[in-house]
Amino acid sequence: MKKIAILGSTGSIGVNALKVVAEMPGQFEVFGLAANSAASTLARQAKTFKARMVTMYDPEAAMSLKTQLNGHCKHLAPGVEGLVELASHPEVDVVLTSLVGGVGFAPLLAAIRAGKTIALANKEPMVMAGRQFMREAAKFKARIIPVDSEPSAIFQCVQGHLPDRAAGDLSKLIRRVLLTASGGAFYKREGSLDGVSVEQALNHPTWKMGKKITVDCATLMNKGFEAIEIMNLFNLKREQVEIVIHPQSIMHSGVEFSDGSVLAQMSPPDMKLPIQYAMTYPARTIRVIEPLDLVKAGTLTFFKPDFRRFPCLDLAAEAAKTGGGMPAVLNAADEVAVSAFIAGRIRFTDIPKVVEAAMRKYKGKPGLPDFPEVVELDAWARRKAEEACAAP
Ligand code: MG
């Protein structure tokens, strides 16, 4: 049995991962669970799956969890400390990182340095310092298996071509990646997006996910992030990643190889599949999703994204091309802007303005920042974005 630790077990990826575990009896032991603040949900999960270790990021929630579990399992320290300990625990085989945002940075680094197999759903650290993480993974012989549906699709398409059975350098083999996007909540909406509400932004047409990523889908920043994540995972240039709007979310991305052949991965939009694949990799096992009905899907359509209407796409592309510390600035500013929008402090169309304001203030230096520099830069960019939120 593979021993698995889930960082972010109460979010949509974590919940789906536990469904996969439940549907594959005898395959996985849930060694540890961690989440931000949903103590009751985590307590229930820990009892159902007999987790050996638990931790909550929020200290108050950690207290509440202790009361609810009442000596059932070992409690690690709250905050980043517990996440890092769980991510690098010697008994863990697979670390599923489905935390939201930059908080996953230190746990990912710890898992890599412990040489773990990492099922990676938390894309923000790979935006902040993806090249550095890939280098570190090669050094410590850690394997990074993408869980996000699009990078997973690409990863599935290139099987048989990868060195060391993990994400890695495909710059010679791949001519182009076709990165598909559902378009988010506002793809079909006409007119100005100035006055759209938080509720409208959270109404995603095909995927049910957490708030942060759903807003990122509505601004298309999520696609900009994924383009950077994919560049970093497979050592590609930004020009090799082509974003295509595909509203049905059936084709989850494709790869055009050097000879012009295109392979794409298709399935119903259900995260259980990429989660399961990352957990069982390199094996393909039983089906835990509904079968794909192409006749029912009927028509699959593809469009060019509208860069003018969704300025986050350009900002992300600029950060990708600039490189160095700029993607970390992009990520931090977006996190601040999205939470300000959800809290009703700024408008939807202020999100790219806040991100751009932070990016314009950044005077990058040549070369890739090291990990401590990225952490510093992240804090700096959050302050700049907060200032921009106060006066967007
Ligand atoms: Mg995705």
Image (spheres, helix red, strand yellow):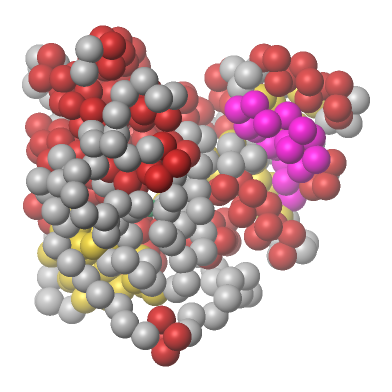
Q: Residue at x 27, y 43 (%)?
A: 219
Most extreme residue toward the bottom, as rendered? 295
Q: Which residues are magenta?
A: 29-45
Query: Percent position (x, y) of residue 197?
Result: 38, 38
Does the segment drawn in magenta span residue 38? Answer: yes
Placement of 333 over or under 47, stated as above or below: above
Q: Residue at x 55, y 19 (%)?
A: 80
**Residue 314 placement: quadrant:** top left
Q: Give the position of the C terminus as an image quadrant.
A: top left
**Residue 232 placement: quadrant:** top left
Does the segment drawn in magenta span residue 373? Answer: no
Q: Please give left or right for residue 176 compared with residue 187 in the image.
A: left
Placement of 203 over or under 156, stated as above or below: above
Query: Percent position (x, y) of residue 213?
Result: 41, 42
Q: Is residue 29 visible?
A: yes
Query: Percent position (x, y) of residue 153?
Result: 37, 64
Q: Please give left or right for residue 218 compared with residue 100 in the image.
A: left
Q: Please give left or right for residue 310 compared with residue 279 in the image.
A: left
Q: Residue at x 69, y 26 (%)?
A: 55
Query: Percent position (x, y) of residue 150?
Result: 35, 58
Placement of 379 over or under 21, stated as above or below: above
Q: Residue at x 20, y 62 (%)?
A: 244
Q: Is residue 380 visible?
A: no
**Total labels drawn:** 0
Q: Give the position of the N terminus as an image quadrant.
A: bottom right
- Closer to us: 355 or 256: 355
